[in-house]
Image (spheres, rainbow, N blue to C red):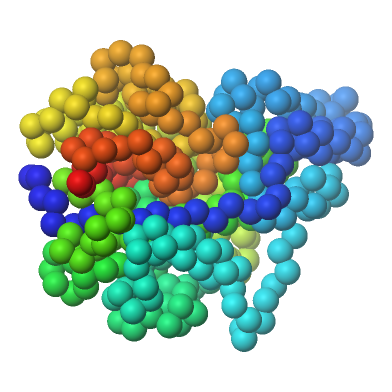
Amino acid sequence: MSNQSVVISGSGLFTPENSISNVELVDAFNQFVDAHNAEHSAAIEAGDMDALAHSSSDFIVKASGIKSRFSIDKTGPLDPAIMHPLIPERSDSEQSLHCEVSLVAIKEALAQAKKSIEDVDAVIVSSAAQPRMYPALAIEIQAALGIDGYAYDMNVACSSATFGIQAAYNSIRSGMASCVVVVNPEITSPQLNYRDRDSHFIFGDVCTAVVVESVDKVHPDAPAFGIVDIELKTSFSNTIRNNFGYMNRCATDAKTGDKLFYQEGRKVFKEVVPMVSSLIVEHLKKNTLEADQLKRLWLHQANINMNVLIGKKVMGRDVEFHEAPIILDRYANTSSAGSIIAFHLNKEDFVSGDKGLICSFGAGYSIGNIIVERQG
């Protein structure tokens, strides 16, 4: 039940310099389609192969609400002969890309929370797409910042950020730490199949971070949000999947097309919306709260149609933008970072006592809800 001994006292955001519009992405995709259909024209005419279909910006907006996305690299995805980001491999002695972007987000979060490096006891990297098996990215970030204590990685796909906050909450409640940084480096573009019409537009790159700490350690000028309650739920499903892993090379008959992101979009929509809506409603009831007591829903940013329907089911009416802000139009799906971006960019108008809910959902299936209340 309600317990505000732990707060989120700061948030940070790293946004890449490169933005790719739907028009740019579609132009490259359609050039690829034309080249593919020309190369295989004989097989297509014989009925042995289906012709690939063009994409369009209107199709993307209608299907998802996405209008653009940020990308670590813009050159590769827009080259019809490449169709993937170009990210040079770094040596073991160099700072990893994921560490580099994490530091930007973490430093902003710490500045907002009025915290120094010496205040931090632990680092949790919680994201869907991590760069290597080991050593842990979190430990690399810990070392780069000069933080004492401990650090570890975790992955719950698009719910990684909320599950990471829950882990930090538990560490503080147990006395293992008094201040934890949770960072979500979601460099998602490398897992995207830019040759697939149904998914080539979905993901963007970004990194978010939050400072989670004991309420008695909060700086009086920090924009602190007390954690009222957290609810997590998982239910296994294959409808969203990425089979890339270290065992791929061991299979002599290994396929290649399924080593990137793929999903059954319609099934995901049909199954996830009622799961998320019901969990939010039950979570509020558990805390003797009504939906209209929430000033804002910071929802996972994967699909505008899902968010509109979830908002309507939770509130019992159509919701306005300020009640459930959308950032995916310019950021696209940034996996677990999406709800945190929405929170980071849309929380300054909260005053003491205002309540909101951070909600993530995605592959697994996994859902994470965090009810928060602005502190005075």
Q: Is residue 260 above or below residue 349?
A: below
Q: Confirm whether residue 277 shows in the render.
A: yes
Can residue 139 be seen from the camera position used here?
Answer: no
User: Which quarter of the picture shows residue 249?
Assistant: bottom right
* Residue name at image x 26 percent, y 68 percent: 179
Q: In this view, does 47 lie to the left or right of 188?
A: right
Image spot of residue 64 (x, y percent): 55, 28
Relative placement, left or right, of 289 versus 157 is left
The N terminus is located in which quarter? Answer: top left
Decide: is 235 above or below 329: below
Most extreme residue toward the top is 317
What residue is drawn where x is 59% and y is 77%? 95
Image quadrant in which you'd find residue 16 = bottom right
Q: How many labels does the image show?
A: 0
User: Along the line of sight, which residue is nearer the eye, 310 or 9?
Assistant: 9
Give the residue drawn at x 25%, y 48%. 225
Q: Find residue 182 and report its image quarter.
A: bottom left
Question: Depth check: 94 or 130 in front?
Answer: 94
Residue 114 % position (x, y):
35, 64
Left or right, residue 36 beside residue 213: right
Report x, y in % for residue 37.
86, 33
In front: 13, or 336? 13
Q: State whether residue 366 is above or below residue 319.
A: below
